[in-house]
Image (cartoon, rainbow, N blue to C red):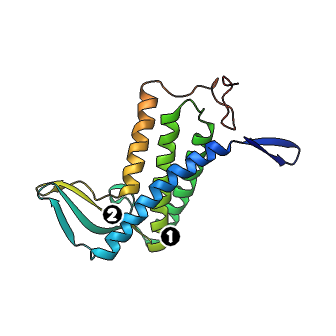
Amino acid sequence: MTNAQTGSGRISVDRRKLLKLVFTAAAVVAGDQVTKAAVLHLLPLHADIAVIPGFFSITHVMNPGGAFGFLAKAHEQVRQLMFLGVSFCALALVFYLYWTTPDRFKWLAAAFGLIFGGAVGNLIDRLRFGAVVDFLDIYVHQWHWPAFNVADSAITVGVSIFLFHLVFGRMPDSADVEFRGKSKKDP
């Protein structure tokens, strides 16, 4: 652990904790961007490749909206401002939640890392293309789940782990948490 001097006091920065977040988020972003680059390079827009006929395809789509096409038909500038603003606010909140999660809550911290990486992966697309590259298409006959990507999958897994902790009472309580993420119970 290292200390950084600020104005009138000292704040502690746990480099290991920060590196765990960076590593987890970077792995998600790398996997997300590599798979999206492959789809962009190898598959024309709206083309698909059946992987498991009648159930799973790789389908190149550009989603200008949010989850399930939310705001897809809104004016482009409104959509961009909304999604960029929400993305930056969400990243700040997830970073705060990660940072204040005590080290003994490893799965919860990993969940926040997955969510953070997924949000960054989709934010990169919004900044580059004004839309998100989606390509994983799960369906049964004509009923399709909305196409998604690696970033969406990481967010879903992270939120599922977070909800598990929330529903089953495995969240840190106020006695566990200090602002800088150091547990009051830990030495």
Residue 135 position (above or below residue 155): below
Task: Locate the C terminus by quadrant.
Answer: top right
Label 2 crowd (10 A; few <14 / some 14-19 / many >=20): many
Image quadrant for the N terminus? top right
Query: Tag on residue 91?
Result: none
Q: Position of residue 117 (x, y in %)?
A: 49, 53
* Amino acid at circle 2: Asp
Between marks 1 and 2, how big is the CA–CA gap?
15 Å
Marks 1/2 in contact by CB < 8 Å: the verdict is no
The part of the image, by quadrant, that contains residue 138 is bottom left
Q: Is residue 41 left or right of residue 83?
A: left
Q: Secondary structure at mark 2?
A: strand
Residue position marked by numbered label 2 in the rendering: 134
Query: Crowding near pointer 1: few (<14 within 10 Å), some, many (20+)?
Result: few
Residue at the limit of the structure toward the right, as seen here: 8
Is 57 on the left-hand or right-hand side of 66? Answer: left
The residue labelled by disc 1 is 127
Question: Vertical placement of 40 versus 94: above or below?
Answer: below
Q: Is residue 105 above or below residue 129?
A: above
Q: Name the side, left or right, on which 61 lies relative to 26.
A: left
Q: x and y percent of residue 145 in the render?
A: 24, 54
Query: For the residue marked with disc 1, what is the amino acid?
Result: Leu
Image quarter of residue 54: bottom left
Residue at 34%, 60% in the rendered image: 69
Query: Where residue 135 appears, x then y in whole percent?
Result: 29, 63
Classify 158 as above or below 134. Answer: above
Residue at image location 53% in from the left, 31% down from the top: 105
**Residue 64 can be seen, yes or no:** no
